[in-house]
Amino acid sequence: MATATAGTAGNSRPATTWHNWAGNVTATPARVVTPASVGELQETVRRAAEEGLRVKAVGTGHSFTAAAATDGVLVRPQALAGIRAIDRTAGTVTVEAGTTLKDLNRALAREGLSLTNMGDIMEQTVSGATSTGTHGTGRDSASIAAQIRGLELVTADGRLLVCSEKENPEVFAAARIGIGALGIVTAITFAVEPLFFLTAREEPMGFDRVTAEFEEHFAENEHFEFYWFPHTGNCNTKRNNRSQGPAAPPGPVSAWVEDELLSNGLFQVVNSLGRAVPATIPSIARVASRALSARTYTDIPYKVFTSPRRVRFVEMEYALPRERVVDALRELRAMVDRSGLRISFPVEVRTAPADDITLSTASGRETAYVAVHMYRGTPYQAYFTAAERIFTAHGGRPHWGKVHTRDAEYFAQVYPRFGEFTAVRDRLDPGRVFGNDYLRRVLGD
């Protein structure tokens, strides 16, 4: 997905321009390095520091912010991949940082194991996904980072630091969602459990009903989420709950129609038409929001939680106190209705329990997420600016890997433990070897 030219494992050479998945962030690093071992990564960091170059690691480029952008050394961790160890007694798996979630999920399933919760795509590396706070939806189970039981990272002086609740606990509290500011993650130990089944129930529902009954749906389901289609009063809900099985996945024809034809193929055409002729979007939205039908199916977790996302977009997502989300959604709908905006992408709503990670969007509070999207290549600033005004008025915290305009002053207000994170950063990287313009804005200097 990136266009940077990387050398062979362990080597480096000057790079061309790198861009992220959405194409809204570009960077021209001095060189790209693909280390074949942790030792080579340590040497890469030491050498860059000696040369006065900054270092950033980048996964598959699925962030919409410039968190990984650099004009220094761009580290590609893809050669540091695979499962190191499975401890069935402890219920953990240790995996190299460059492993994609797709490869991890499939490998765990072969071993009869699974993560407890995950996001809706699995193209990211485990280190990139956790460092930016990737999450799914859950009443009791939290983000991917909240399932971390230990991690290793190379610090600014080239040391390898091991962190857990017992070893360097203050670093562990921060580094699970470190935004690349504390070091380069080399391995992560996740909690896992025996493979289980989820039954998914997808059902269209009106906006007024789903918002009025939001707390009820949240309380009654292990994993509840819904999508609202702007310019309509229509939503599509999804409830995932554990079941005894057996697996009863959608039939091949049904799966192709729902997941490929409607969710990707037709959606691509619809968005392309909407970009070319914005006036058609409200009519298209009314038709599209009725195209998806109710269905129920059962399968192993990653086959239920995740789905293909081939239509490219730009996204903003804010984490709100859960008790504020319905008001924020009603304000968002009213704003869209009275504006001249034309929004072809649905708005996604998910939840998470409170966790204890320093800069987690769910740190210390029960959370609901509202994500707004625009088709790639479509002007998004007016929509995102208006939405962000609503979200910040409700004390929202933006996703670290998605578009936002907030800075360190704002984060110091909405994160009670913000100072703890910056203190750890000052200790581990006083020279800002891992710094860039994005981190200067969100963390200060």
Image (cartoon, helix red, strand yellow):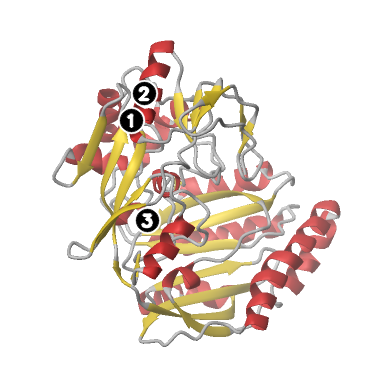
Residue 323 in sight here:
no
Could you tell me the amino acid type at mark 2?
A: Glu
Q: Nearer the viewer, residue 363 or 48?
A: 48
Indicate the position of residue 263 as horizontal and vertical percent values.
67, 68
Amino acid marked by disc 1:
Gly
Q: Residues within 10 Å of mark 3 (few under 14, many from 20)?
A: many
Q: Going from the N terminus, do you reach mark 2 or mark 3 first?
A: 2
> Of the residues tagged 3 and 1, which is closer to the observer?
1
Q: Name the residue under label 2.
A: 43
Circles 2 and 1: CB distance less than 8 Å? yes
Is residue 320 found left or right of 158 in the rendered image? Answer: right
* 3D distance between C-alphas at marks 2 and 3: 29 Å
Q: Which residue is under mark 3?
A: 144
Give x and y (percent) for residue 131: 40, 43
Residue count near mark 2 (Cα–Cα under 10 Å), binned few <14, some 14–19, many ≥20: some
Q: Residue 433 carries which label?
A: none
